[in-house]
């Protein structure tokens, strides 16, 4: 299946092996372990954006993720649960880094507007690393 990316830095990070998963909405539950992943810069359905495939991989694992705003007592502005388990501050930093983001970028990406209560999605893993 296709995974498309909007930023060049994600292409570089996947090729370097530092972006080891992606977080996506997957409400129909399409992703399965063992599926081929076709990584694309840009959307191949929009030829004006000059899309190109830059890697092929395999889905090694899938985990449910819930991202919510945190409280003022927390180090970060977010609370993250993966498969129902709350992540520590250090684990949140690792999660963000492994997704090619900082914690602040992760907050802005998944909770972009005031009043967003939560983001519910899935982590699609490119390696055996799980949280």
Image: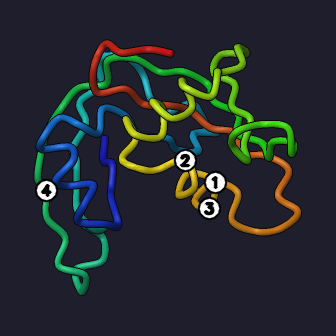
Cβ–Cβ under 8 Å for marks 2 and 1: yes
SS category of the residue bearing label 2 = helix
Marking on residue 107: 1
Sequence-wise, the earlier of marks 2 and 4 is 4
| Residue 122 location, quadrant | top right
From this view, report whether residue 21 is shown above or below residue 118: above
SS category of the residue bearing label 3 = helix
List x then y, in percent, for residue 71.
87, 42
Marking on residue 53: 4
* Residue shown at 25% from the left, 60% from the top: 9
Name the one closer to the observer, 14 or 120. 14
* Residue shown at 43% from the left, 50% from the top: 101
Marks 4/3: CA–CA distance = 27 Å
Name the one closer to the observer, 44 or 19. 19
List x then y, in percent, for residue 117.
85, 50
Marks 2/3: CA–CA distance = 9 Å
Cβ–Cβ under 8 Å for marks 3 and 1: yes
From this view, report whether residue 65 is shown above or below residue 75: above
Tag in front: 4 or 3: 3
Cβ–Cβ under 8 Å for marks 2 and 4: no
List x then y, in percent, for residue 87.
65, 21
Sequence-wise, the earlier of marks 2 and 3 is 2
| Residue 110 location, quadrant | bottom right
Name the one closer to the observer, 46 or 131. 131
SS category of the residue bearing label 1 = helix
Marks 1/4: CA–CA distance = 28 Å
From this view, report whether residue 24 is shown above or below residue 115: above
Would residue 112 be found to the left or right of residue 30 on screen?
Answer: right
- Which residue in the protein does label 2 denote? 103
Cβ–Cβ under 8 Å for marks 1 and 4: no
Tag in front: 1 or 4: 1
Q: Residues within 10 Å of mark 2 (few under 14, many from 20)?
A: many
């Amino acid at each position: 299946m296709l995974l498309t990316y909007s930023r060049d830095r994600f292409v570089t990070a996947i090729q370097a092996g530092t972006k080891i998963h992606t977080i996506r909405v997957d409400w129909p539950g399409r992703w399965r372990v063992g599926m081929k992943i076709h990584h694309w810069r840009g959307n191949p359905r929009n030829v004006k954006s000059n899309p190109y495939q830059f890697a092929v991989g395999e889905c090694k694992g899938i985990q449910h993720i819930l991202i919510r705003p945190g409280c003022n007592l927390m180090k970060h502005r977010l609370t993250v649960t993966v498969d129902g388990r709350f992540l520590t501050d250090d684990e949140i930093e690792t999660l963000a880094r492994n997704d090619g983001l900082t914690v602040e970028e992760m907050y802005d990406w998944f909770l972009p507007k005031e009043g967003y209560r939560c983001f519910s999605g899935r982590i699609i893993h490119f390696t055996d690393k799980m949280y």
